[in-house]
């Protein structure tokens, strides 16, 4: 077991070191107290950003740039219980996360990645797309979904903040893309990747028994009320011997949720029930709109070197500042 832990740590550390192709380093920073409460009202002079332990001259962006969000949702066969919980989340994502002048797009992924809704500011349109989301396969190409989301964000106006909200398992199951390439693109685009995670083994226990009508698209419901009322068999039994062994093998993979959120200055939150899902969306929305957006111009250095960065609040060691982990120097 300890050998597996060492291997995972080695892979995670290697993948976390990504290259930057932009001269300006972008560091969204969250400041909280010991109880996790957000601290507002700090000025650039209150914050110290260290690049390889050397303090830098920073700029604090006080302009609230509009936000572009891509929500990427795992739609594999073991995610049916989670898809059932998402129907009412459209307005939360639009209002709490994207916010005023914000826009949201929606993709789903399983064996492949599908565009469900292009960028919109209309919460009703987004809610409709979420309510019609259905299982589409058995795979879970999470890294492919992240890359596709970044391609979509790359076509938005450069003055918009770029955020990806993943709603998926912690680990990828079927992507062909490699983690270093993904991290490089995330750094190049200055994307923050938040991740809401869940256990496919436990979430089915939180759902009431479903009918045919529950799983039909909105436009198809009501055409045959008798059929709509038919009770469906339970979702694939969590806790079965086969699923337990499958999940144990899956645990050997890198925790993509932790790695991608941590290296981009965001975070991952686990949920089980629908109320916890809605609270997590609200918590991320609050954080995004209370970030301190720091930028700095790194000094010329030897290409290919990893620079770690951290932020502190001057004279207040009891406050915690969280930002991205670092960047690579290039020519």
Image (cartoon, rainbow, N blue to C red):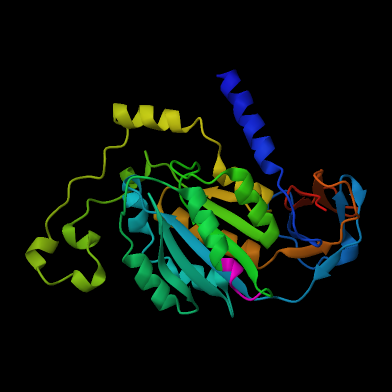
Judge by depth and name the residue closer to the eye, 267 or 32.
267
Q: In the current view of this chain or complex, which residue is farthest to the left?
A: 226
Apparent side of residue 8 relative to residue 312 in the rendered image (left or right): left
Apparent side of residue 48 relative to residue 244 in the rendered image (left or right): right
Q: Residue 15, relative to residue 295: is it above or below?
A: above
| Snapshot quadrant of residue 211 | bottom left
Please give the name of the residue rendered at 43% of the width and 28% of the height, measured from the top-left corner: 248
Judge by depth and name the residue closer to the eye, 130 or 105.
105
- Our reading of the magenta stretch's main secondary structure is loop
Percent coordinates x, y for residue 97 in the rendering: 56, 68
Residue 178 magenta-highlighted: no
Please give the name of the residue rendered at 64% of the width and 55% of the height, measured from the top-left corner: 185
Percent coordinates x, y for residue 260 in the rendering: 61, 48
Apparent side of residue 214 relative to residue 306 in the rendered image (left or right): left
Q: Residue 189, relative to residue 1: is it above or below?
A: below
Please give the name of the residue rendered at 37% of the width and 38% of the height, measured from the top-left corner: 201
Please give the name of the residue rendered at 37% of the width and 45% of the height, measured from the top-left corner: 139
Magenta-colored span:
153-157
Q: In the current view of this chain or complex, which residue is farthest to the front?
A: 331
User: Total marks drawn?
Assistant: 0
| Quadrant showing the N terminus | top right
Percent coordinates x, y for residue 48 in the rendering: 88, 55
> Can I make out residue 280 in this image?
no
Percent coordinates x, y for residue 193 in the rendering: 60, 56
> Can I make out residue 38 in this image?
yes
């Amino acid at each position: 077991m300890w050998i597996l832990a060492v291997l995972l740590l080695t892979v995670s550390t290697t993948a976390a070191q990504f290259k930057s192709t932009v001269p300006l380093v972008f560091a969204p920073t969250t400041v909280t107290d010991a109880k996790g409460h957000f601290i507002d009202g700090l000025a650039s002079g209150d914050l110290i950003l260290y690049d390889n332990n050397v303090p830098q001259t920073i700029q604090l962006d006080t302009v609230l740039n509009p936000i572009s969000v891509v929500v990427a949702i795992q739609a594999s066969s073991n995610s049916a219980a989670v898809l059932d919980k998402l129907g009412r989340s459209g307005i939360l994502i639009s209002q709490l996360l994207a916010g005023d002048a914000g826009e949201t797009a929606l993709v789903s992924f399983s064996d492949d990645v599908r565009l469900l809704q292009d960028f919109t500011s209309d919460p009703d349109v987004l809610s409709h797309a979420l309510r019609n989301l259905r299982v589409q396969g058995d795979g879970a190409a999470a890294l492919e979904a992240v890359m596709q989301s970044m391609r979509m964000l790359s076509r938005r106006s450069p003055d918009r903040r770029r955020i990806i909200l993943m709603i998926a398992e912690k680990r990828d199951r079927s992507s062909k893309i490699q983690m270093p390439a993904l991290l490089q693109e995330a750094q190049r685009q200055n994307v923050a990747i938040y991740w809401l995670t869940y256990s496919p083994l436990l979430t089915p226990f939180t759902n009431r028994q479903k009918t045919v009508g529950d799983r039909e698209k909105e436009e198809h419901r009501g055409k045959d009320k008798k059929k709509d009322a038919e009770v469906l068999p339970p979702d694939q039994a969590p806790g079965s011997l086969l699923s337990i062994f499958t999940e144990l093998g899956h645990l050997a993979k890198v925790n993509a949720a932790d790695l991608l959120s941590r290296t981009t200055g965001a975070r991952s939150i686990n949920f089980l029930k629908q109320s916890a899902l809605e609270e997590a969306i609200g918590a991320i929305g609050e954080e995004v709109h209370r970030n301190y957006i720091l930028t700095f111009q790194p000094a010329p250095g030897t290409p290919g070197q990893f620079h770690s960065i951290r932020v502190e609040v001057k004279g207040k060691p009891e406050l915690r500042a969280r930002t991205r982990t670092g960047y690579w120097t290039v020519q």
